Amino acid sequence: MIKCKSCNGSGEYVGLYKKEICSECLGLGTDIQIIKDLILKQNQLIKSGICSMIVDEPIDISDPVYIVDNNKVGRAEAKNLSCNVLGIALSKGIIGKSVDIMYSGIAHGILSNADSNTLYWLQNYGGIGKKVPDKERLFVIGFSLNESDLFVRITDYGIRI
């Protein structure tokens, strides 16, 4: 067992954002699994690049989104030359409710029947697709890893003339 910096070893070690705190210091007694699960989930969210935002207009799963106003997101479209894509929705977004948005990392199950290593672009009227938009704002949303997973890596190529 690694000794806790707070209690010098009276409880079990938990790594929490580079601080070493034991279950006794956290007031959890010997049931430390709750904290371990929380830490694992937080680390996965950080590694994956996921944030939560309030929805300003209806959003479907995998829709690219942008900041509309006051920390609210809407459905991004390539024809909207002023939008800056934040990421993709990981679930259906309902107006006034929170939705998880992935801005980097692997979005599992977002695609269907995709060829691996294919670029996916923001489309003229929203959503993602393989077609490069004509005379619109060019955003690569990411690329397919396999038939169902998208590696999200938002890249803005500006306006196509």
Image: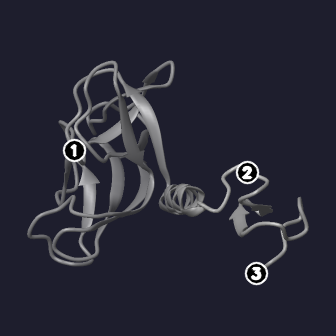
* Residue positioned 18% across, 68% down in the render: 148
Amino acid type shown at disc 3: Met
The label number, if any, that marks residue 61 in the structure image: 1
| Looking at the image, residue 120 lies above or below residue 72 | below
Which of the two labelled residues, at mark 1 and mark 2, occupies the earlier sequence position? 2
Left of 9 or right of it: where is 75?
left
How dense is the environment of label 3, judged by Cα within 10 Å: few (below 14), some, or many (20 and up)? few
Mark nearer the viewer, 1 or 2: 2
**Number of numbered discs visible in the structure rendering:** 3
Amino acid type shown at disc 1: Ile
The label number, if any, that marks residue 1 in the structure image: 3
Residue 5: x percent and y percent? 89, 65
Residue 160 shows in the view: no
Residue 46: x percent and y percent? 56, 57
Distance between mark 3 and mark 1 Cα atoms: 43 Å
Query: Which residue lies under the disc numbered 2?
Result: 26
Could you say which quadrant of the image residue 4 lies in? bottom right
Q: How is the image coloured?
A: one colour
Residue 116 or residue 109, whichever sits in front:
109
